[in-house]
Amino acid sequence: MHQPLSLAELQALLARVFSADALAEWGLLLACLALAGLLSWALSRAIAKRENSVLFGERVIDGALFPLLALGLAFGARRLLPLYGLAPALFKLALPVLVSLAAIRFIARVLRAAWPNSTAFKALEKLGSWLVWIGAVLWITGLWPVLMDELDDIGWKFGTVKLTLRNLIEGGLTATLVLVLALWISAAIEAQLLRRESLDLSMRKIASNAIRSLLLFIGLLFALSAAGIDLTALGVLGGALGVGLGFGLQKLAANYVSGFVILAERSLRIGDMVKVDGFEGRVTDIKTRYTVIRSLGGKEAIVPNEILITQRVENSSLADPRVLLSTTVQVDYDCDVDAVMKALAAAVVEVPRVLSDPGPSVQLSRFADSGMELSVFFWIMDPENGSGGVRSDVNLAVLHTLRDLGVDIPYPQQVQRLPKSALAPESPTPQS
């Protein structure tokens, strides 16, 4: 990176940039941008582009690869200009702009890949973009070293350690770079793990969560060390804080530990149909702190992992995804119940989603007041698709079968007895 410019040098540089002598530089810069776009497009065609790609983005040029290639080509072109007797003017301004653009694209794409569904992403992206552009303007105008010198005079002393605003800013920039690199590596490893169909999805989730936590922890240690913070003193302070926070955040820690236990034991897996605290649905995601359960009606419940460990959980598909369902119907006492039961079993087995092995069964449940009650039992393999539709189809098959056999479905009848006084005719009213 070139040295920052003074104000007089900047004014002279701007005059040269917009002069006729800089036309060759403008053409060379446009050629670098066009070549960078062409190379990015060719690489996106050669490499399988994936969702939330850090390098290619959504439209190739909005990824991190395009500004990085443009920066490399522009840097090479700037080195070649003195060989042909040309003094670089435009490239002194273009290089800081390309560096800022590459930093913004890279940080934004890494954050989007790490947290694709985060609502705070756009606000964080705008804040980071403004900070990077402000830093680029300060560097180009030559105000950056002046500002850093002024900030170096503002500081605090903690024992033998002196901290200044300059140290905090430089340490923050270093920490941001290290953490973004750690997030990029963890997101790439997580994407590779989640695409491996040979491994169980729950095991892939626990591996990706563990790798991300480990890389972020290592990145945080490097960032703190780069910022000039003594890690030995931080270890003593962290131990003291850990004891205090252990009591205050024990619920939060219990949820994180429970999340790893659930993923390791595979007592709950993504796709299982479960019922927790009266809420029934399908497990759609298992996080380190909570589990997301989506009901068949579209509602989602966020259940802390500690509840899934300490309370009763009904899992319909833990060892066997087959689920037994039933429906009841009453038939007339005068019908041939044996023939009716065989006909109902044969009709229900033809219903879609009803398994033939084990097949449906019909049992005489009880003798009701109005007729004989028959219970129809049947198995399904896909409880995640709901039970209302298949139960309705079974009820329709039962109704059509009974109508074809001429068997009546009795309905309750009530006999009302009135006292004789209510049945006696009223005496005529005497006429005056």
Image (tube, rainbow, N blue to C red):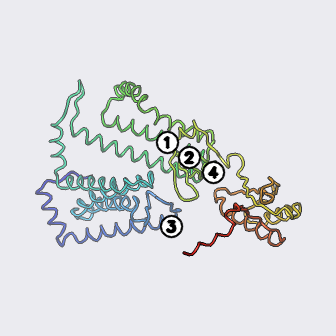
Residue in front for this viewpoint, 112 or 87: 112
User: Which residue lies under the disc numbered 2?
Assistant: 205
**Image coords of residue 61 (percent x, y):** 39, 65
- Callout 4: helix, strand or loop? strand
Q: Which of the 4 image quarters holds residue 24?
A: bottom left
Crowding at dot 1, Cα within 10 Å, few <14 / some 14-19 / many 20+, comes out as: some
In which quadrant is the C terminus drawn?
A: bottom right
- Separation (CA) of disc 4 from disc 2: 18 Å
- Callout 3: helix, strand or loop? helix
User: Which residue lies under the disc numbered 1?
Assistant: 289
- Separation (CA) of disc 3 from disc 2: 30 Å
User: Which residue lies under the disc numbered 4?
Assistant: 273
- Separation (CA) of disc 2 from disc 1: 13 Å
Q: Amino acid at mark 3?
A: Arg
User: Does residue 3 lie above or below 152 as drawn?
Assistant: below
380 horizontally vs 238: left or right: right
Front disc: 4 or 2 = 4
